[in-house]
Image: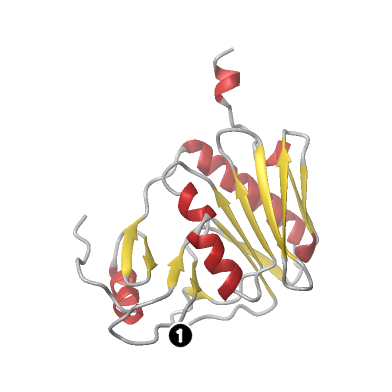
Amino acid sequence: MGLPKTLLNEDDYLAFERAAMDRHQYVDGEIFAMAGASKEHYDISSNVVVSLATQLADGPCRVWDKDVKVRSGPLPKSPRRPAGLYSYPDIVVVCDEPKFLDEHQDVLLNPLALIEVLSESTEAFDRTLKLARYQKYNPTLKDYILISQDEPLIEHYHRENDGSWKYTIHEGLQAIVKIEAIQCQLKAAEVYRRVKFESETDE
């Protein structure tokens, strides 16, 4: 891949990433090239962006797509021991004034909702380390949503007022996911518009 073999600190990663043609995630000093997505992935992401943008309209919140980096901790304790996560969520919702890492304004610090469309190559990461980092190091985050592209299934993690997280699973095309923090909802039938599942194509 032509990627650096040594561990990078955050400044080196950002310099590398801002000059790169492709996108890379950063995990505690290591960088990982992001794989391409399927047409189902693109359709689902587009459907969600359109739905949320329509509902948010001219209000205080806005929806951004996969080209926005989000930083999650921890902060490095030593330059020789890099730490931290820089990721590219598929969909980001930010409200009021966005807060950025620096003057480049390409690393967001205050997401309110993050949405990932699961794929075989990223699902384990989205469910484990990424979820844990988001929950622990992004205090503004209220909702983390995982959308399957293989079946009509949407998983919703919501931060309660006491800081605990509630997990809800929504199955089937009749499901509706309510995102109360931004006063929006995702209807599964709209999320999966144009998506054909294997059970349908095999009939």
Q: Quadrant of residue 171?
A: top right
Query: Does residue 61 lie above or below 22 as drawn?
Result: below
Total count of labels: 1
User: Label 1's element?
Assistant: loop
User: Seen in the image, is 9 located left or right of residue 54?
Assistant: left
Q: Quadrant of residue 161?
A: bottom right
Q: Quadrant of the N terminus?
A: bottom left
Instruction: Decide: few, some or many residues near mark 1? Use Cα within 10 Å; few <14, some 14-19, many ≥20.
Output: few
User: Seen in the image, is 162 located left or right of residue 63?
Assistant: right
Q: Is residue 133 or residue 140 the one in the foreground?
A: 133
Q: Residue at x 32, y 64 (%)?
A: 31
Query: Does residue 192 lie above or below 14 as drawn?
Result: above
Q: Residue furthest bottom?
A: 78
Q: Quadrant of residue 91?
A: bottom right
User: Seen in the image, is 10 located left or right of residue 97?
Assistant: left
Give amino acid for label 1: Glu
Q: Give the image location of residue 27, x and y in percent.
A: 38, 67
Q: Give the image location of residue 41, x and y in percent.
A: 52, 42
Q: Quadrant of the C terminus?
A: top right
Q: Give the image location of residue 49, x and y in percent.
A: 63, 52
User: Seen in the image, is 177 located left or right of residue 104?
Assistant: right
Q: Is residue 82 or residue 93 the one in the foreground?
A: 82
Q: Residue at x 66, y 48 (%)?
A: 155
Q: Residue under circle 1?
A: 103
Q: Give the image location of residue 114, x and y in percent.
A: 61, 61
Q: Residue furthest top?
A: 203
